[in-house]
Image (tube, grey):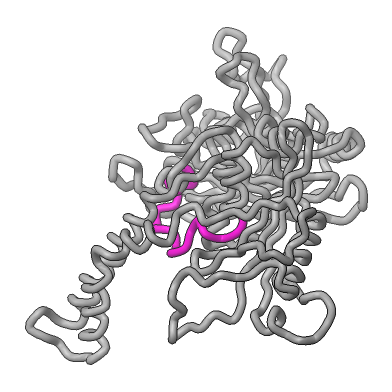
Amino acid sequence: MFPPFPQEEAFEYCKQTADQIKNDQYKVLRITQESAERPQTGFMIGSLVCTDPAGEKVVLKTISGIANKLEKTSLCPASDKSIYVDPIVSNDEIHKAYEANDREIHRLTAIIQQGKDTEEGTIKELKNIRTNLCTESLLAIHKLYRFHCADGSVKTIDQIREERGRTQLTQTGTGECCAPKLLNYAFSHNLHPVSMAETYVTLSDLNSQLKGAVSLTLCPPCDSRCGVLLPSMLGIEILYRDEHICVVNKQSGVLSVPGRLPENKDSIVLRFLRLFPYAIEQCAAHRLDQETSGIMVLVYTKDALRNLSRQFELKTVKKEYEALIDGILPKLGIPEEGQNELYFRVDLDNRPHQIWDTVYGKKAVTRWKILRVEKYTAPDGTTRNVTRVLFMPQTGRTHQLRLCAADSHGFGVPIIGDSLYGTRQPGEKLKLHARYIKFQHPVTGEEMEFYSEPQF
């Protein structure tokens, strides 16, 4: 995943830590027994630079996993005020969670490795039993973790998986990478992240007798573990960020900008400004409907906003949306691809619902392409045929694509999960995703392209 914060300042502290280890100002303590099959060759060093409520700098550091920890020695200078962050869950707690099934898992593994069916069952059956035991152990470990988030909430791994729409269990070790440990500490101690970096260092470099700084490899947060946790901890999933713009993957159900009522303040903009308070207040270059998921562009400066707004006005920004339409469009005579022009305005008696009006309505132009007909499984377990459609809007009107699908002047068939123009089952989300955008960078002029795979 893309690094959520600038890395430069924190990277310097990672280098400082590596040099301190080499110079015996820190020692690396082994907490767990080293595996004979997989001897350790190196580890990750992470650093998070924060500010406290008084505006003072606080430097956090940690190393990945639970196998090792850092400890200051008498050689460490008194000027080093950095705070070492321990694992979120201790090695003893994790060991106890594993203990219930560990002996049986190893026993089954030994039998399976012999490659012969036994009275206990076939190799396939024994593998299934072992898999179930491993799953039980992993779930027991997941229950130990609590992650403090930017909005003040505390979430479990299962809550994060549900929030992120992840059906598969996360990998072993989720929560012990540097980034979630550092952010968990920061958010639980009312610290504001400014710069974060994760680096890899080899033991051979640390143990080398050669003089000079230790060589570090700068690494982004991993997709398999941090890519699950960090978007929920931060409140937004960052696809790209520099000093001028930030591209995020908006989740369905979250407003793009704050609403007028207090209960509608939570939004992508509010979450973005919580992380980056130095950005301008009107930081959304464009908006997505609350129920629509996908790519959204935010800015840090007025100049960047002005430039991007102009690109949207000139219609030079290219966008694509993917949707599941609740029916078989080819059977309704809808061609494989085409373009329509619709005229809508807001229903003054039923906001934000839009109604057809060729006199006062604004023209909405949409190109579409049918991708395929496929099976859809609803939350209640029923299945039906639906049509996956690619939308390429040429204008940016309110509810344009939802109306292109649902209105009788369009397809006459709503997008699945559309609570305004169709029906939505409990637990169902609108199947409309902003999957692609292309624009010119507002400062460098470079062509920027981003793609986000829909989660349906």
> In the drawing, does residue 113 fall left or right of residue 289?
left
Quarter of the picture containing the N terminus is bottom right
| Residue that protrudes farthest toward the top in the picture | 349
Q: Nearer the viewer, residue 212 or 357?
A: 212
Can the viewer see residue 328?
no
The residue sitting at 57% across, 52% down in the picture is: 180
Taking 105 as reference, is 260 above or below it?
above
Which quadrant of the figure has residue 379? top left
The residue sitting at 66% across, 29% down in the picture is: 342
> In the drawing, does residue 95 fall left or right of residue 57?
left
Task: Find out whether residue 294 is within the magenta segment.
Answer: no
Q: Position of residue 171 (x, y in %)?
A: 44, 63
| Residue that protrudes farthest toward the left in the picture | 119
Can the viewer see residue 23?
yes
The residue sitting at 78% across, 38% down in the picture is: 56
Which quadrant of the figure has residue 280? top right
Q: Position of residue 382 (x, y in %)?
A: 29, 44
**What range of the chain is rendered magenta?**
161-179
> In the drawing, does residue 190 fall left or right of residue 15?
left
Q: Position of residue 284 (x, y in %)?
A: 75, 33
Which quadrant of the figure has residue 21? bottom right
Determine the main secondary structure of the stretch shown in magenta.
loop
Q: Position of residue 74 (x, y in %)?
A: 69, 64
Taking 83 as reference, is 150 above or below it?
above
Q: Nearer the viewer, residue 272 or 247?
A: 272
Q: Nearer the viewer, residue 214 or 120?
A: 214
The residue sitting at 44% across, 81% down in the picture is: 35
Q: Nearer the viewer, residue 96 or 426?
A: 96
Task: Find out whether residue 177 is within the magenta segment.
Answer: yes
